[in-house]
Image (cartoon, rainbow, N blue to C red):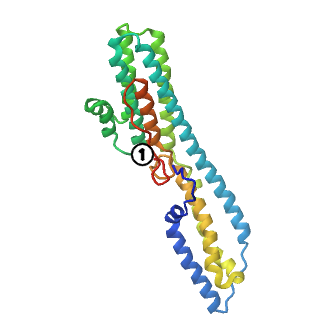
């Protein structure tokens, strides 16, 4: 996620330079054709066409941003639920020293769960992160499953089920923990829905098609009035439309591990810090932005 306050024109150019270069070459060709031949271009209702495309792209961008914001909201809910789980675990195990192991097992697995979910959403292997937090045995057990994050959540539930069977907690306390685990599982389901369900094809295909058609027609409509300045004017207008198109495309997948994504790494570090401090253990420092980007 870009958190810097300075405009990132360089980032915009990096994302659209290829179609922008093609557009500039086309603009130059249209201008040269207009100057060197007696043929005049037909008048085109380019203003009306551009307005319609802008409205269409606005709908697509709003839909993409809604997905991005829902992803951020779900991760915020996961952070709160993780804190609740750590606080409840700490409260239930505080009075009995023998249950200190239960406390650490739950907290370490919940930290590993957050990191595992981050890796799964980014299509990365979560083994190393799980092993770093909980050890290789837990990592081996979790990663043989298709959904390692869900396996870790089941481990937490099993730990409390064993505590209930041993009489260390009662049924009401175990039910309280399960309600928090349900909140965590629901948040994960929402994130997986966003990741696995793309925008409808119409929201992706038609804005791309119409924007490129508009950019092709733009110099034809402007060359009569702009003359030699057509490549500059047409390219600048095309830059605006291509940039908006690129922004909507970037927001479509908030877990693609790009500069526009939800900062999963930073939020996982927040969970790790809060839960370790709840357990009275040393915690790492929060992640800092790198060149204005928080990952």
Count the marks. Answer: 1
Q: Residue at x 49, y 69 (%)?
A: 18
Height in image: 162 above or below 242? above
Q: Quadrant of residue 245?
A: bottom right
Q: Assess disc 1: are there few (<14), some (14-19) or many (≥20) residues with their C-alpha within 10 Å of its C-alpha.
A: some
Please indicate whether residue 288 sits to the left or right of residue 57 in the image.
left
Q: Residue at x 33, y 33 (%)?
A: 133
Q: Residue at x 32, y 12 (%)?
A: 98
Q: Nearer the viewer, residue 58 or 128?
A: 128
Rendered location of residue 280, percent (x, y): 39, 24
The answer to whether residue 114 of the structure is visible from this angle is yes
Q: Write down the residue under mark 1.
A: 122
Rendered location of residue 76, percent (x, y): 53, 35
Q: Nearer the viewer, residue 208 or 105?
A: 105
Q: Nearer the viewer, residue 25 or 273?
A: 273
Among all residues in the image, which is located at the extreme top?
A: 167
Please indicate whether residue 242 sits to the left or right of residue 114 in the image.
right
The answer to whether residue 204 of the structure is visible from this angle is no
Please indicate whether residue 207 sits to the left or right of residue 225 in the image.
left
Rendered location of residue 228, percent (x, y): 64, 85
Q: Nearer the viewer, residue 57 or 119?
A: 119
Q: Quadrant of residue 159?
A: top left
Q: Secondary structure at mark 1?
A: loop
Q: Residue at x 51, y 36 (%)?
A: 75
Rendered location of residue 69, percent (x, y): 58, 43
């Amino acid at each position: 996620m870009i958190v810097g306050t300075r405009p990132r024109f360089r980032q915009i150019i990096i994302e659209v330079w290829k179609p922008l270069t093609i557009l500039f070459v086309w603009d130059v060709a249209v201008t040269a054709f207009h100057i060197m031949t007696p043929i005049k271009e037909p008048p085109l209702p380019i203003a009306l066409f551009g307005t319609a495309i802008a409205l269409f792209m606005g709908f697509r961008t709003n839909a993409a941003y809604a997905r991005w914001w829902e992803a951020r909201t779900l991760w915020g809910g996961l952070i709160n639920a993780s804190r609740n789980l750590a606080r409840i675990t700490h409260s239930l195990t505080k009075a009995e020293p023998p249950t200190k192991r239960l406390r650490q097992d739950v907290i370490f697995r919940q930290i590993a769960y957050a990191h595992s979910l981050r890796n799964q959403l980014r299509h990365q292997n979560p083994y190393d992160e799980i092993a770093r937090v909980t050890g290789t045995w837990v990592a081996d057990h979790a990663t043989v499953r298709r959904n390692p994050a869900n396996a870790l959540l089941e481990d937490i539930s099993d730990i409390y089920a064993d505590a209930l069977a041993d009489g260390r907690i009662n049924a009401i306390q175990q039910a309280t923990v399960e309600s928090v685990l349900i909140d965590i599982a629901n948040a994960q389901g929402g994130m997986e829905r966003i990741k696995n369900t793309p925008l409808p094809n119409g929201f992706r295909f038609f804005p791309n098609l119409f924007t490129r058609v508009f950019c092709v027609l733009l110099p034809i409509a402007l060359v009569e009035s702009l003359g030699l300045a057509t490549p500059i004017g047409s390219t600048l207008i095309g830059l605006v439309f291509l940039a908006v198109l690129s922004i909507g495309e970037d927001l479509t997948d908030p877990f693609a591990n790009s500069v526009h994504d939800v900062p999963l790494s930073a939020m996982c570090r927040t969970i790790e810090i809060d839960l370790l401090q709840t357990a009275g253990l040393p915690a790492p420092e929060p992640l800092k932005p790198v060149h204005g980007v928080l990952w």
